[in-house]
Amino acid sequence: MIQRPPTLAPLCALCAIATSLGVAGCRDSSGGGAATGSATAPATASGVALAWGAPLPVSSAPGDRATAVVRDGGGDVVVAHPPSAELLRVDAAGAATAEGSFGAEVKALVWADGALFAATSQPSTPDAADVYERGPSGWTLSLDGTEDVSVLFAEGDTLHAIRGGHGLPTVHFERPPGGPWQPVAGSFPLGVPTAGVSHAGELWIALAPDAASGDAVLVHGRPGSLRPELLPSAPMGAKQVVTALCSTPGKLLVATVSTDSAGNVLQSQLVGYDGAAFRQELVVAGDAFLCLAAIGGTAFAGSESGQLLTNSGSGWQASGTPFPGAVTALHAPDAQTLYAGVSGPAGVELYAASVTGAAAATGGTAPLPLDYLSDLKPLLAGCVGCHASMQTGFRLSSGLSDDAADHQAVLGQVDLAQPDASPLLTKASGAVGHAGGAPWATGSAEYATALRWIQDGGHFDKTLLPAASATPTTPTTPTTPT
């Protein structure tokens, strides 16, 4: 396990950010890079235990920043660390190999459709917004862009590339599984794309103001039909940028950084969106939240000051002594593993932790079951377009305005005896034919939330449950939606 110096900046200490902020979508320190001696006890917070292994040196070049970490289908971990033009691939035995050579900085890595993809960006550099694919013979250009900035994220095995830049319109390209890239019709508000994620059956895309000051904007919906949402405002005269988006069960998590005209960080905030409203969860002065990840109901946030914060539902807490560098990339490929890319004055290091208790409730009490109102209803927002207006076997109210009726309609699509066989899941995951595609891909946060809601009993409102809650009345044989 790592040993970290005990005298680093506390969470809210003012810090000068000398490098540009990295931006991420949901889903690196000391010179030598080797851990010393025996390890300290695992860091714990909110019931989560993180047992960190020895860091792996990624780059010794001062100024390199870990912008993305991903584990590919073969179990290798790949780290992007611009401005170096190459990626570092680490196999299960710990052997590291440099691969790829890109004309611009790699800012995103995504494993989807059985392949690894990399997106490049370079502000104020035309033709930098490209997407590359790694195949048997190495990296090849997959999508050639003429813009400056490219945001890349996956919705199941469908890829979305959002491209734009200063003074440029934002455009959207989509790559279905096994298919070519296709342009998506539609327009975006004025701004520069910084992050994107799939959440609750919708795409969420963040745009920074294309000016020296102003608030960031989030747009969400289905491809070609996106609507804006305003975040809690930045300080007067500041420029607000969304640095990361992360889908967690029942909630979208947003990290923002606000800077003054000279680029100095004024404040950073973590904001949650539960399907009805944005709520500030944490605001700090002088520090910058740069990356997010989630395992079950536990969220993680990394900051410029080296802090790793966790939240399992009882509020944000520091997970231990800060890292010896900025936490600029996080990746949680499964329920037991968390990777952290740490960027310090001497280069970049990769840390890996085994995670236990990530979805545990706080205070030693059992968690309340998921319910329709708080957890499942937000996931259905992307389903209303078809299931409220078309004649299907699964009918929802317009705008999800009738909670009781919609709850009963959804219960008609679940099988409490075999939750994972529920038509609600087999249709939404694409396991069986569904005209609406696969908005809740197996393994996604949306799928996990819906599955747990069924496993918990399909309740309507957890706040109304007695100590021993009754199982809702559910049809013995679920009806089959179309």
Image (cartoon, rainbow, N blue to C red):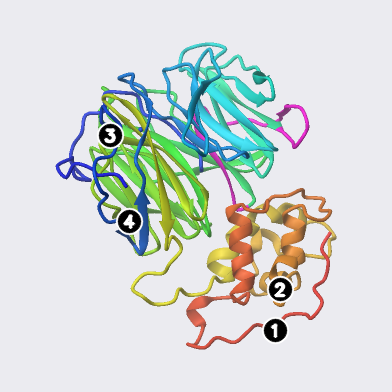
Task: Say few, some or many: other residues with alpha carbon within 10 Å of mark 2 (under 14 / 14 to 19 / 20 or more).
Answer: many
Which residue range is magenta in the image? 175-200
Residue at x 29% of width, y 48% of height: 283
Q: Is residue 89 above or below residue 364?
A: above
Q: Say whether disc 1 or disc 2 marks the residue closer to the N-terminus.
A: 2
Q: Which residue is mark 3?
A: 325
Secondary structure, mark 4, is loop
User: In the displayed structure, does residue 418 sit left or right of residue 371?
Assistant: right
In contact (CB < 8 Å): disc 2 and disc 3: no
Residue at x 47% of width, y 17% of height: 122
State the image coordinates of residue 393 (x, y, percent, origin top left).
Answer: 83, 65
In contact (CB < 8 Å): disc 1 and disc 2: yes
Q: Which residue is mark 4?
A: 316
Type of the residue with mark 3: Gly
Type of the residue with mark 1: Thr
Residue at x 27% of width, y 24% of height: 346
Q: Say whether disc 2 or disc 4 marks the residue closer to the N-terminus.
A: 4
CA distance for labels 3 and 4:
20 Å
Mark 3 or 1, which is nearer the eye? 3
CA distance for labels 2 and 3:
49 Å
State the image coordinates of residue 182 (x, y, percent, origin top left).
Answer: 74, 27
Q: Is residue 176 magenta?
A: yes
State the image coordinates of residue 323 (x, y, percent, origin top left).
Answer: 27, 40
User: In the displayed structure, does residue 99 sit left or right of residue 442?
Assistant: left
Q: Which mark is residue 411?
A: 2
Q: Is residue 381 above or below residue 127?
A: below
Q: Which residue is mark 1?
A: 473
